[in-house]
Amino acid sequence: MTRTVRLQEIASARTGDKGNRLNLVLVCRDPAHYPVVAAQVTAARVTQAFAARKPTRVVRYDLPKLAAFNFVLDDVLEGGVNASLGLDGHGKSLSFLVLDIPVEIAAETSCRSIRGTVS
Amino acid sequence: MAKVFIGAAAGFAGDRSDAGVPIVEVLAAQSGARFLMYETLAERTLALCQLERRQNPQRGYSPALGRMLPPVLARCLAAGIKIIGNFGAANPAAAARRVEEMARSLGVRPPRIAAIEGDDITSKLSASDLASRRVDGVDLAQAREILSANLYLGAQPIAQALDQGAEIVVTGRVADSALALGPLLHAFRWSTDDWDRLAAGTLAGHLLECGAQVTGGYFADPGYKDVPGLAEVGYPIAEVDETGEMVITKPAGTGGVVNRLTVIEQLLYEIHDPSAYLAPDVVLDLTNVDVTEIGKDRVRVSGARGRPAPETLKATVCVDGGFLGEAEISYAGPNAPARAQLAAEVVRARVRTRAPHLNVRVDAIGVRSVWGAAGATMNLRGAQTDDVRLRFAAESSNASGVEILLDEAEALYCAGPAGGAGVRRRITPRLASASCLIERRFAEPRVTILGAPR
């Protein structure tokens, strides 16, 4: 049995920029969720979440020892902080595009184990 | 084993000026080698400083110097805490003299100050020289004038300055991580080809260089990632041992949190390939790093691996980027989305006939703004809100080019839909930048010392 939660429930994320390229760090709150996230939050799925920003390339680097992933997305910052006409040229808000992705987790996973890792 | 303590009191030019105070109290209670680092040099800051120096040869250092150092300078000198900062920007020598004056006006003894120069290659390479290298960013071959071109120097000149007894080291452009690696090279006498240790020192610098981003800043998400005392967030301290293993922590009694998530988020921040983070002194491999919570607000980080330094150095090149014009106006109450939509259509129609070349972006703040795609057509009719703030933006090579848009937005007051309120308008000069890979021979680091040895 599985149930669907938003990725925000089981993972943490932040973004950083270099020119017109964004990196997005995704960390599993509980390392036990690493395989689930690895299987579902693929480069293709993240590309889909960023469809409005038209990425030209999305690469996922896996860091199993850290239960984390590093996504690198090319050409999603409308030219970057020095060129974008938009409000968020750094892409600082964009981690939440990925944290909104629904993921299927084991139904018996308790809320406590999902949220309990941050002191 | 003796540890080296490195605190980080600023992660960008706009950071808090009082962030260093609690760190200095912690470091003052320790003995041995202790350092306080400041990273204050955005790409934009350096280019603006270069322009300022052209106007006045005594200026061109970071304005953050004047507000960040006074709260800690006297205490650091008294306690033997060395300060390393890239406050020098386009004029490290002038920044060093400014620190001298600051010490005098605070009534403390004259410190021994080192200025590190040699990162500036603006006069060494032309636009076409730069464009012939591997470039990422704006097309330099089209640039009318290079405003600034600076190499990222490594940690060795910082270590040399400290070896010569500097108490304050002021640099121009250096790799941010070098602000921590330099002190570690100095304190531990690490060999410059001990790649794993250089990698560990680079990692320490990388974790520290954004200040509070490793201690609960840029992190809190209420209900998901709660951070206690964010208003008084403590800035980080790394306790590094001779092997390069470190503990990331923060001053007791401050707000914020240091845990596995804050550290891993920052570990990978602005990294591309985690197996090959290129720094001037080493190529850092993060794939074997371990991050372990060992106590409250104490996280141990180990396992950094290094490979020989890259053949080339990165340079940031800034050129004129024209002007960004922005104007905003609000519509509130019943039917606000429809009135905002009409206002957007009015401005677009006016600009289309009067400045057809101008590319106008319209956002509806609170409805669709931050995540809106450039060029998307907005339809606010039917939006469930009674409070819409419209934002218009455009860019042009000259200020008058964007004035046309701002004038049209302001004219909505009298000639637009009902109830248009609170116009704000702003023109911002812009810089465009590119990064290039440059041969190492163009870097000529020089250490200049002011003040007597102690």
Image (cartoon, helix red, strand yellow):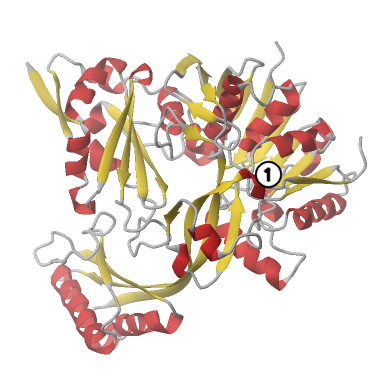
The one nearer the camera, B180 or B219, is: B180
Q: Is residue B325 left or right of residue B18?
A: left
Q: Give the x, y percent position of residue B364.
A: 24, 64
Which residue shows up at 38% across the image and 23% down it?
A: A118
Q: Is residue B123 left or right of residue A67?
A: right
**Residue that protrudes farthest toward the top in the picture:** B1
Name which quarter of the figure residue B125 lies in.
Answer: bottom right
Specify the quadrant that holds the N terminus of chain B.
Answer: top right
Badge 1: residue crowd in 10 Å (few <14, some 14–19, many ≥20): many
What type is the residue that disc 1 sits on?
Answer: Gly
Q: Give the x, y percent position of residue A99.
A: 25, 36
Q: Is residue B80 visible?
A: yes
Q: Which residue is mark 1?
A: B85
What count of labels does the image hold? 1
Q: Is residue B86 visible?
A: no
Q: Is residue A2 left or right of residue A110?
A: left
Specify the quadrant that holds the C terminus of chain B.
Answer: top right
Q: Give the x, y percent position of residue B117.
A: 73, 50
The one nearer the camera, B412 or A33, is: A33
**Residue that protrudes farthest toward the left in the picture:** A1
* Subunit that carries the residue with mark 1: B
Query: Compared to B268, does B452 lie above or below?
Result: below
Which residue shows up at 36% across the image and 80% down it?
A: B406
Query: Compared to A75, does B143 lie above or below?
Result: below
Which residue shows up at 77% across the image and 21% down it?
A: B31
The one nearer the camera, B448 or B66, is: B448
Q: Give the x, y percent position of residue B323.
A: 44, 73
Q: Secondary structure at mark 1?
A: strand
Query: Compared to A76, does B299 lie above or below?
Result: above
